[in-house]
């Protein structure tokens, strides 16, 4: 029997920990003995409700290596991560480094591995906002162009890469100079399907908050572009409060720590007091994945600037008002399940009113068959065993 393919998986931010659950599960199940995984946690997210809760709920093994880099400026944080990942790879060269998404942890993993000539596998490759003011856009472009395997969740992602000169037909063995682009579906869809039933049994949050099925709005806000700009954060909270008042509907807002901090410093005292006094405006700490699924499934409408939450809303058939000027998940907008409203209270109110009144059209399968993780493992093994 061939020696197993040894991968080092780099995670750090909340959505990456969640995404990692799907492939970690496949590696320990279907691919046991053929692939081994070492988990490296950069420590980009570190609060228990931003990190540990997902290991516990999703059955992800404890990280083998914890860098503990914590928060910092982009340069300082990324530099600490590159240094730490490089040190680990020098001590133990893995066959491949597996990276998720577009955070600073992704960027650091790509740079460290590529410079040591260790092949990079990028899950969620090919996404583009065409807005380089977003730190994530820079991170994902660098990572894609350092990668040997580019695993695309959607056909649009493949097309974006083709426009940048990638050839989707490059066969095995893939190399950094002849990378392989593969449409695999989305590991987030795998996870949402796998954990939906567990969420139904385990989560009591909607009941605890006294919410009715299809009777509330779920909101999340955390993009730096929204949270760190006084005009935008005030506009968004004004709009959310309006939705609560006008539709008489509870709003649930699990607060990312960044948003909690910026609310304290940037919301006007009047708006802050109004939001806190509104009877059905539930500002709650970040919730675990099972509670989040329960909220997404129970909501009538989702209002968010999160990439992952936009998609999960789609998986569970809920319309989305996107608090951004653009999105990487363009299919949702093209098909009418999402509307881009930016941080404009008028557009947010209008889009929400239409969705609440009319619902949304159908939700065709766009994100694979729920087995993206297995498809990714199969491709990684081609040319190895
Ligand atoms: C990061 C990613 C973003 C992703 C998001 C997911 C980058 C550039 N951004 O943004 O793409 O959508 O994660 O949630 O990588 N903080 C805490 N506790 C924590 C983590 C963060 O209090 O456990 C606070 C700190 O004040 C920190 C701030 O949140 O400075 C921002 O954290 P950071 O990881 O730098 O960026 P995010 O906004 O979380
Ligand atoms: N999420 C969660 N609890 C929360 C908010 C989000 O479990 O309080 C999950 C959500 O279900 C999705 C992921 O975190 O799987 C999205 O992460 P986030 O919005 O932080 O980042 P993005 O997807 O925008 O990078």
Image (cartoon, helix red, strand yellow):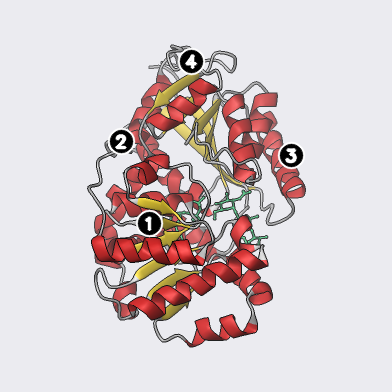
From the image, state whether disc 2 or disc 1 is nearer to you: 1
Give the residue displayed 48% in from the left and 41% down from the top. Answer: 328
Using the image, determine if residue 190 lies above or below residue 48: above
The residue under label 4 is 167
The residue under label 1 is 320
Q: Residues within 10 Å of mark 3 (few under 14, many from 20)?
A: some
Give the residue displayed 34% in from the left and 76% down from the top. Answer: 247
Q: Nearer the viewer, residue 130 or 82?
A: 130
Coordinates of residue 240 in the picture (x, y in percent): 46, 71
Q: Quadrant of the C terminus?
A: top left
From the image, state whether disc 2 or disc 3 is nearer to you: 2
The residue under label 2 is 368
Using the image, determine if residue 104 lies above or below residue 212: above
The Cα–Cα distance between marks 3 and 1, rounded to whole angstroms, is: 39 Å
Coordinates of residue 309 in the picture (x, y in percent): 42, 54
Q: Residues within 10 Å of mark 4 (few under 14, many from 20)?
A: some
The residue under label 3 is 83
Q: Are marks 2 and 3 in contact (CB under 8 Å)?
A: no
């Amino acid at each position: 029997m061939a020696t197993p393919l040894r991968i080092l998986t780099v995670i750090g931010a909340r959505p990456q920990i969640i995404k990692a659950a799907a492939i970690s599960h496949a590696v320990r199940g279907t691919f046991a003995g053929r692939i081994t995984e070492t988990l490296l946690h950069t420590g980009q997210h570190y609060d228990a409700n931003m990190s540990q809760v997902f290991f516990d709920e999703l059955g992800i093994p404890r990280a083998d290596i914890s860098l503990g880099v914590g928060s910092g400026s982009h340069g300082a944080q990324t530099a600490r991560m590159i240094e730490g990942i490089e040190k680990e790879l020098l001590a133990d060269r893995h066959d491949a480094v597996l990276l998720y998404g577009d955070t600073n942890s992704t960027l650091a993993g790509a740079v460290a591995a590529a410079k040591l000539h260790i092949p990079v596998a990028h899950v969620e490759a090919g996404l583009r906002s065409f807005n380089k003011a977003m730190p994530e856009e820079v991170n994902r472009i660098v990572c894609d162009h350092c990668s040997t395997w580019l695993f695309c969740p959607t056909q649009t992602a493949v097309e974006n890469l083709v426009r940048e000169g990638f050839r989707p037909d490059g066969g095995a063995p893939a190399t950094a100079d002849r990378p392989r682009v593969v449409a695999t579906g989305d590991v987030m869809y795998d996870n949402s399907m796998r954990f939906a039933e567990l969420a139904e049994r385990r989560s009591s949050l909607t009941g605890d908050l006294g919410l009715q099925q299809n009777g509330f709005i779920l909101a999340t806000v955390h993009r730096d572009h929204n949270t760190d700009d006084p005009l935008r954060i005030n506009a968004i909270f004004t709009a959310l409060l309006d939705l609560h008042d006008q539709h008489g509907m509870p709003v649930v807002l699990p607060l990312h720590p960044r948003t909690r901090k910026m609310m304290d410093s940037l919301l006007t005292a009047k708006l802050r007091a109004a939001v806190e006094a509104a009877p059905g405006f539930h500002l709650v700490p970040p919730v675990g994945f099972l509670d989040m699924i329960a909220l997404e499934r129970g909501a009538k409408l989702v209002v968010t600037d999160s990439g992952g939450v936009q998609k999960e809303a789609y998986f569970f058939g809920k319309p989305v008002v996107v608090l951004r000027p653009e999105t990487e998940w363009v299919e949702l907008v093209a098909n009418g399940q999402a509307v881009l409203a930016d941080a404009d209270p008028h557009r947010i109110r209008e889009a929400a009113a239409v969705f609440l009144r009319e619902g949304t059209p159908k939700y065709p399968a766009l994100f694979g068959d729920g087995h993206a993780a297995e498809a990714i493992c199969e491709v990684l093994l081609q040319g190895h065993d």
